[in-house]
Amino acid sequence: MPHSQESRGIAGIILTSLMASLLAVIGIAMALGGVMLLGEGGSAYYLAMGLALLACATGLFLRRRWSLWLYGAALAATMIWALWESGFDFWALLARLGMFVGLGAALLLLRVRRRAGSPCAHVGVQRLAGGLLAAVPVLALAASTSGAMPFGRDPSPVLTSNLAIVGAAPGSEDDWQAYGGTSAGTRFSELATITPENVSRLKVAWTYELADPHGDGLEVTPLKIGGSIYACNASNVVVSLDASTGRQRWLFDPRIDGTNLLARICRGVGYYKVPGATGPCAERIYTNTVDARLFAIDARTGRRCTGFGNNGEVSLLDNMGEVLKGYLIPTSAPTVARGMVVVNGSILDNQYVGEPSGVVRAFDGVTGKLAWAYDAGAPNRVGQPEAGQVYTRATPNSWAPMTYDDALGLVYVPIGSPTPDYYGVLRSPIADEIGNSLLALDVESGRRRWIFQAIHHDLWDYDLASSPVLFDMPGAHGMVRALALPTKRGETFLLDRTNGRPIDPVVEKPVSTRGGVPGERISPTQPFPQGMPSLADGHLTEARLWGLTPLDQLWCRIRFRGARYEGQMTPPGLTPSIMYPGYLGGMDWGGVAVDHRHAIMIAATNQVANYVKLITRKEADAVGARPFGMGATADLKKAQGIAVQHGTPFAAITTPFFSPLMVPCQQPPWSKLTAVDLRTRRVLWSRPLGTGQDNGPFGIASRLPATIGVPAVGASLLTASGITFVGASTDRTFRAFETRSGKLLWQVPLPASANSGPMTYKADGRQFIVVAAGGHHILRAPTGQKLIAYALPQS
């Protein structure tokens, strides 16, 4: 034998042995995992495939021609099983077939010949090649029909409706005067210079670096009043920018102490024009800071309004009793209503029983004096507590953006879940009464007018995190003053905002009560709206679990089968449970937007499950879990992922339901953008949001541009010309869709994902679109600090 042929022969033997070893390792892993899965009542496929791979590996070691035929038969059987279990869904088939098709191609490259057993082996290779090539049209067909790929179908046209917008001041079309555009929170603009026909011509008009020394990202939706933009960063630094050029006019730094805080967030600021006032502070900007202060700033100069409180600031710690640093964190913009500044604030979750009060307060917009306080534990008291008393501790807090109806004199306050989130035995009756409810408070007195509870006795951290959206819609007896209440559950309630009664029926449906800890008062039913479609993406099953390879998919299946999951509201307990949707939603702080011209609601929904397990106090103490600020560092708490719940018998471990490769265990899409017709209550279109370009295993960007629907949280912007602008997705892309059809019209890369809310305004005759590219640590999206404005090129 010539030397070159001998060398090739030795190389072939080595490569064949390596391939056989690889198949053996995969086969052992699949067989052992398959036994575990089968023992949990799962699919028998993985055990069978593991044994087949072990047989193939044995054949390759022995250089038998039947090993290739066996592999081909196993691959064909896998294709049949994959189609039976998941249908023509590209991402589902990729997880099941991708690795095995790649291994088959590698086997073909070995080109086993006579020395492997028989000349007939070459014929087997050719036939196996044909079989693998036959998989290509199958995958292509799956890609073209999958809802996770960008080959959508336009729905039927949407007719003009007679919904009416509320809360817009006359002549304010060119401005963006509140967090949601107006006090109604619709995130809709009457501006229409940018159209579906010319949106593809948008270019960057200006940028501004809203630098934060702590490196936190941006969640801000800026305001535009007159010729100025007002925005804040995570350290509550407020800037005023020229609306046409982005040039800084002034900067106000409240100089917060941002050390050792678990959250630094500023979603926006408030604006107030004092009636009849002239001179300094006739127009004011309000910001509530993460170290629990409220500031009034002159909108023209950026200087403190010295007549407001104490030299322009009010402490939000007054009458709160002991508040450890970082436990009261106002994150959403103040709501300005009838000359008052209404402030809520986040109370740090899951630390200990008896945390600070969730009181909602209103301050006089000129003097800073307390106008009223809604303390759920003392609902008949309007002012501050008596000397020596404090606002009732351990009442549920409100941290989401609020909305306001001036005609009705009502402020709509979304209330979060009582803390601790995952153990409710020690909660007070008032905590169970108002937790996870929408409150309508009288703007003059702070008294409660009505209450609607969206979740009973929450054990899942399903805060009402979204801004309620106000609009008027036609009903059987004329126009109805309506309100849309989005939830983390993916459900949307339509309410009459005058009295809180459902416009569509709300049905109490049975939910699981099994698996909770002893003594827990698990609600046997939960409210479900019957009119609006659910955006919760249905029920998880083993077949809907995913992985980048069959191996991590198998791992996810074993974890799923080993946990309790009986649909939404599966109670947490000492054995693992699956929570779906997870605590990021559904709809979170991004909420929904409403186009009143066409009666369309747009929602960006996140769809990633959580894995939840309670542990005993002894177990928590053994790993040093302590409430934040009581001996444990923030890094320790994050590293261990423990919700301490001190003062209860149990702590909780809540993590995203991810595979060992750090990708979600359920099959894509992990987020969607959905349009709902508010007249018919039907979904007009729904599409995955985001590509895999900036996502991948272990957080490494895959650079794959395929639409997959990546984790996303953020708000949308709707315009009268029929465009939906949205960032939200972790693929660092800003997009424009046709509101009527969902057709992608324009997209542009961002320096960081836009987990915020875009806004629009007109200045010098041009329409601008502004978005904050800030990223978010919870979504594992790298943070940024840049405001970017887009506009059509000047002719």
Image (cartoon, helix red, strand yellow):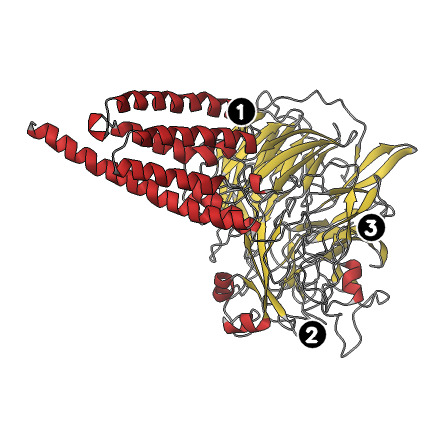
User: Answer yes or no: do the residues labelled 2 and 1 have beta carbons within 8 Å?
Assistant: no
| Residue nearest the observer in this picture, 761 or 134 | 134
Q: Earlier in the sequence, mark 2 or mark 3?
A: 2
User: Residue 161: image x %, image y %?
Assistant: 79, 26
Asked if 326 appears above or below 336 in the picture, the reply is: below
According to the picture, the residue beneath numbered tag 3 turns out to be 410
Q: Is residue 97 left or right of residue 545?
A: left
Q: Nearer the viewer, residue 16 or 569?
A: 16
Under mark 1, the amino acid is: Ser
Which residue, given by chain and number where applicable, does mark 2 sit on?
Answer: 321
SS class, disc 3: strand
Circle 1 SS class: helix
Extreme-left residue of the structure: 2
Residue 657: x, y in percent?
54, 50
Residue at which label 1 appears = 200
Task: Quote the CA–CA distance across marks 2 and 1.
Answer: 55 Å
Relative height, residue 225 to residue 455 (above, below): above
C-alpha separation, residue under disc 1 versus residue under disc 3: 41 Å
Residue 662 visible within the image: no
Q: Which label number is shown at residue 658? A: none
Marks 2/3 in contact by CB < 8 Å: the verdict is no
Query: Badge 2, how many Cα within 10 Å: few under 14, some, many 20+?
Result: some
- Dot 3, crowdedness within 10 Å: few (<14), some or many (≥20)? many
